[in-house]
Amino acid sequence: MNRRSDGGQHPVRGRLLRGLVALGLTTALLAGSTAPTGGIRSTAAAATTAHAAPVSTAAFELVSPTTKRPLQWPACRPIAYAINPAGMPKGMDAVIKRVMAGVQQQTGARFRYAGSTKRTFGAQSRPTVPTIVFAFTGKTKAYGHRFAYPGEIGMGGPVGAWYMSGDGRRYEAITSGRVLLSTAFAGKRTGAGATWQSLIRHEVGHALNLAHRSSRTAVMNPMLTSKAPSRFTSTEVAALKRVLQRKGCDYAAWSRL
Ligand SMILES: [Zn+2]
């Protein structure tokens, strides 16, 4: 008999949400400046919880309190992604699909478009299969965040859960990922640089459990500038592979989360 345990002060507790990270654009970018200081600034600190990850795993949003390793997605089967079309700019689904195809190509993990969903960014229940949900908002305030262009234009993160079985074995995994994009953003759709495609790739990185990186040319740099790359760096790909479990996935255990 398996029961979700409720004890302990752990960063990853039954369906506790972590890893919401926001992006913002500065006026410098809006004005067309190419100054290296222009672009997106992070407001991530306010959105993450107070649990500090060990230095060695600081590259991740969710780290297991027991193993100290980043929480993983079961990725032996394709990971589903779905889009809530409410408020979606026309054709943006194609940009999302392009981003997901790129992540698949770079990591070897597979992603499957599961169609549209009514699931919202705020949904906390576990989906039936590991799923990344994309949603849009035209509001200036949503889920405790202020969206504007210039300003914050997106956020994303993984949702992790765990339970303890009767014999004391702990199972923990990522159950879903979520991305919220502000339709106030007026960037170009595709290509490298400060585009929707770059923004979505960055938020997918968060949804897959990557945290921010300081490298200016990293996808996970909190500043979305003209330097935003069209692909994850090799360091980021290595990090993605650590959170995408390709062998020995226990989907039966996952379904009990
Ligand atoms: Zn970010």
Image: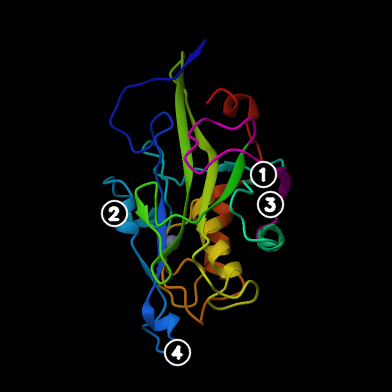
Q: Amino acid at mark 4?
A: Thr
Residue 132 relative to residue 147: left or right: right
Outermost residue to the bottom: 34
Magenta residue span: 101-129
Look at mark 3 in the image and give the residue it sits on. Answer: 109
Q: Residue at x 49, y 77 (%)?
A: 217
Q: Does 251 sit left or right of 24 as displayed?
A: right
> Which is nearer the N-term, disc 1 or disc 4?
4
Mark 1 or 2, nearer chain start: 2
Q: Judge by depth and name the residue closer to the eye, 185 or 61.
A: 185
Crowding at dot 1, Cα within 10 Å, few <14 / some 14-19 / many 20+, comes out as: many
Query: Badge 3, how many Cα within 10 Å: few under 14, some, many 20+?
Result: many
Q: Earlier in the sequence, mark 1 or mark 3?
A: 1
Count residues near mark 4 (Cα–Cα under 10 Å), then give few for <14, some for 14-19, many for 20+.
few
Residue named by callout 1:
79
Q: Measure the C-alpha gap from mark 1 to mark 3.
A: 8 Å
Q: Secondary structure at mark 3?
A: loop
Which of discs 2 and 3 lies nearer the camera? The answer is: 2
Check residue 46 in the rendering and tell me which mark sits there, or answer none.
2
Which amino acid type corresponds to the residue marked 2 in the rendered image?
Answer: Ala
* Residue of label 4: 34
| Numbered disc in front, either 1 or 3 | 1
Q: Please state which of the two labelled residues, at mark 1 or mark 2, is closer to the viewer.
A: 2
Residue at left offset 37%, top offset 79%: 27
Do the numbered discs 4 and 3 sit on residues whose CB atoms are within 8 Å?
Answer: no
Q: Tag 2, which secondary structure?
A: helix
**Residue 5 magenta-highlighted:** no
Type of amino acid under label 1? Ile
